[in-house]
Image: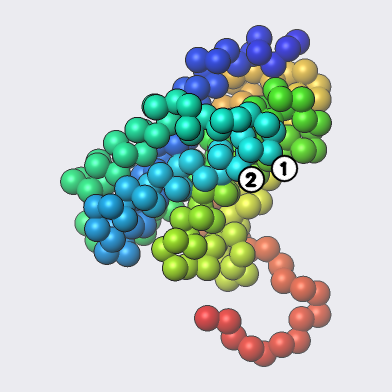
Amino acid sequence: MQLQQIFSPSVQHTLDVIGIFVFAISGALLAVRKNFDVFGIAVLAEVTALGGGLFRDLVIGAVPPAAFTDLGYFVTPLIAALVVFFLHPHVERIQAAVLVFDAAGLGLFCVSGTTKAYSYGLNLTASATLGLATAVGGGVLRDVLANEVPSLLRWDRDLYAVPAIVGATMVVLCLRYDVLTPFTSAVAAVTAFVLRLLAMRFHWRAPRAWNRRSTVTEE
């Protein structure tokens, strides 16, 4: 079965817009927590929402990238920024909201990124890799612009990339065995989302180097 028979352009577009919106929400909420002005909120929303997809499109040769050819992709983060600007949660609840929205975007983008990469002729491994990059790229740029070490690189942060890897792997396994459907794609996205939430709830972290003996405490 051809991938286009499973995901029509409208379905793929809808998945992208949903992922863009929830990532933009997480970026805008972080900007509020950092006390950015309205321009900073909009910039962080745009970068968080479009950064990973922009990288993916450049790698697979989908140029010009969708972020520059589809007005909806550019406007959606601005709408999210406006929503956050006027209706952001109370300050003490912003961090929790950032993490939940970020987890939702992680799940959606690891699926849509993997399927789009595969539709452009990449093999399963490369497709999963770009699905991961799509999911975490915007968050990395967000953290860098907000003057924070990206969560992806922090040993003392709960698992971030692993849930996206699991979601992308589920998608390529479904592709491999020809069972990828909207339902199984949703299962992969929800699995990544739930894994990220569980990692935050129970503080699951990746191991550091074996027999690491340094007593230096990172900040």
- The secondary element bearing badge 1 is classed as helix
**Three-letter code, disc 2:** Ala
Q: Which residue is painted at 77% across and 18% down in the image?
A: 178
From mark 1 to mark 2, how far is it between C-alphas? 6 Å
**Three-letter code, disc 1:** Thr
Marks 1/2 in contact by CB < 8 Å: the verdict is: yes
x, y percent for residue 103: 49, 46
On-image quarter of the N terminus: top right
Residue located beneath label 2 in the image: 133
Vertical side of 71 occupied by 36: above or below: below
- The secondary element bearing badge 2 is classed as helix
Q: Nearer the viewer, residue 64 or 189?
A: 64
Residue located beneath label 1 in the image: 129
Residue at the far front in the pictured view: 64
x, y percent for residue 158: 56, 61
Query: Would you say 212 lies left or right of 39 here?
Result: right
Query: Would you say 32 lies left or right of 167 here?
Result: left
Q: Which residue is painted at 60% across and 16% down in the image?
A: 7
